[in-house]
Amino acid sequence: MTHTPQLTLLSLSLATTAAMGQSNGDFELEPTLVTAERVAEDASSDQLVNPALNLGGKLPHSIFETPRAVEAITREEFVQRGAQNLEEAARYTSGVQSAYYGLDNRQDFVRIRGMRSQNYRDGLQYNFNFYNNTPQENYAIEQVDIVKGPASLLFGNGTAGGTVNTVSKIAGPDAKNEIMAGYGSHDRMQFGLDYNQAVNEEETVFLRLVSYFRQSDTYVDFVNDDSWFVMPSLTWKPTEDTSLSVLFNYQENESMPSLQFYPYEATQVPGFTLRNNLYAGEPSIDRYNTSQKSASLIFKHQFNDTYSFNSTLRYLQSSADYVEHTIVPPLIAQGVFGPGTPAGTYHRLLYASDHETDVFSGNMALNAKYELGTVKHELQLGFDFNRADRERYTLPPNPGLYNLNYVYGGALDFTNPNYGAMAATLPDRTELDTFEEELYGIYLSDRIEWNNFIVSLGARYDDYSLATNQLPSDTQQNWSFDAGVMYQFDNGVSPYYSYAESFEPQGVNDLTGDPLKPKEGTQHEIGVKWMPDERTLFTASYFDIEEANRVFRPDPFTVTQSSSVDIQGAEASLQHRSGDFFFQSAFTYLDTANNDIDGSPALAGVPDYQASAWLTYSPQEGPLANFRAALGARYTGTSSDGRDALETKSHTLVDAMLGYSWDDFDIQLSVSNLFDKQYIQTIETSETLGADVSSAFLGQDRSINLTATYSF
């Protein structure tokens, strides 16, 4: 195409081991999160990589010493697995479900413990509302941190499932220079530059430039996935106790919507096999183009052995031009357009919107480390804020259709697509709504160490206000609490208990303009972490999550907030390094219930079981020295459609990697879904105009990418 620039017993057994458990988290009450020395820098190390989480200065501690479930995925780790985006970077992590709608280039879709995650960048909220941000590019990321379970003490606004925080590449003395080029499936061409340099003889000022360009098609016909960004940063470090970094980022993405809302009926047409490459929209009209620019200021200062201060500020501006045809469910089409549509032919609606978003956010914290007798304290008093202004323009209301702000987009024969035969003409877009959101939070936490005990306590108060063109002003207040306790035995076993809370503002009812109550979540978690030596880490946990005030839409004209969700689950993970080998495995069991629907069915698209394993062989001596190879497998169990009427089949995908390094050069071949397995990733059923309608989302096909890197 043309591009423009730019297992029940097993689960019970693991749940029991969960008392000896994993990095999963749900309750710790303070931003007490991981710091631990990286005891290994690369796959050749004979020690386990136990990296530090970087959550914008919120009391880091080692993963092993944190009484809640957390994960840190280093750049080395996700690059060696050939991850092309954030979803792929996280997919070998317990409790995490990535790309649950298949290929979707509109946003980074990650579920943690059965719920959509909130995404942060450098400790500050990154995505505001849907489809008005550019997806994050892995080439800009140093590390991916995952906090499992509620984390409102740390971040304020967030879901009960968990939070993903990515760490930007920033100028400094440890950064390495490289040039990268790659080519892969669907004519995917990508180029990257990462250049870092001290600009004075004293090496107190560092400049870094990270830039990236990609031009690519996808396995979906007509859909491109082009992106580029430039990200310069400057760090001034006048002393060992003080640093100031300035980071700029500009990114543009040009694409078409890759996610296809296929009606489930299309997977059941006799004599026809629905493939994931079928584009259900109009190639000449549809688009999803986004741009984003941001400026960040990161300051750290150590006053003395007791007191320190850290602060992060960011201004972010994003825009999106979104036009897409969506399929009208067949049962609804009969009522709206009349019967007589041939099998395999589906009516479509056309949606179009423009988004403009401006965000100013920040976090600042004063930290104190001191001892009272034999008791060690790490106290943190912090303040953070978000101010987001958003404008949305869309099509004028169309009372002739069951979905307002849509126009009729013609019909498409899936068995013999004929695009452009009845393409809709786009009316001028009008302002639909404006939002002004402000969130201010103050938090206090204390980490206490006494003998073999670690205790974390914390509380947070948030004030949230929202004004729209329909609602002059509405203010909500919320308290969040967090607590955790861990006991560290001398043999490396550390059991823990944790409690945590979350809240998530939900804006307004788009039908009435009335404010919606925030979602509120709680979690109890018991677990164990076992680290017998620096080469092995095992974690397991059992957790119980409840979330209330979820929005439920039985049809386009009704919105309720009586919905609640219960999730119980168990997780386990193992990492082990020995000589030339590194092994990693993960297991997840989830039992979910949506209490707003009769019978409390399981949540749509959330598998009951997930398991994965990854083995890397990287010999350091002999004829195969500098060579590396890896093989991974990902198992996904069955999942419900949200009504317990339909379910997906389980599937197993295999990934592989081959690489070779010599001098300053490295070349790597990565394959995802090695055997090109075709499968349905998710089925969702919802009630619309009194009828249950189901959509099917197909999984991603095989992807092969070859990358060459020169370091200097």
Image (cartoon, helix red, strand yellow):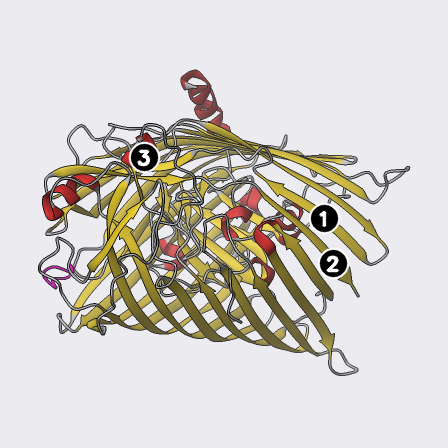
Residue 709: in magenta span: no
Seen from the viewer's position, the closer of residues 64 and 76 is 76
Point out the frontmost of discs 3 and 1: 1
Residue at image x 33%, y 60%? 130
Circle 2 residue: 709
Residue 494 lies left or right of residue 8; in this view the side is right
Amino acid type of the residue tagged 1 in the rendering: Gln
Q: Quadrant of residue 47?
A: top right
Give the residue at mark 1: 668
Pointers 2 and 1 in contact (C-beta within 8 Å): yes
Residue 683 relative to residue 79: left or right:
left
Q: Secondary structure at mark 1?
A: strand
Question: For mark 1, does the 10 Å Cα neighbourhood hold few (<14), some (14 to 19), or many (20 or more) residues?
Answer: many
Name which residue lies at 13% across and 48% down: 337
Quarter the C terminus occupies: bottom right
How far is mark 2 from mark 1, CA to CA?
A: 9 Å
Per the rendering, the mark at residue 163 is: none
Instruction: Indicate the position of residue 541 as horizontal and vertical percent values.
Output: 46, 33
The magenta span reads: 509-515
Inspect this view and state whether residue 604 appears. no
Query: Distance of mark 2 from mark 3, alpha carbons?
Result: 44 Å
| Towards the viewer: 89 or 454 | 89
Residue that badge 3 annotates:
567
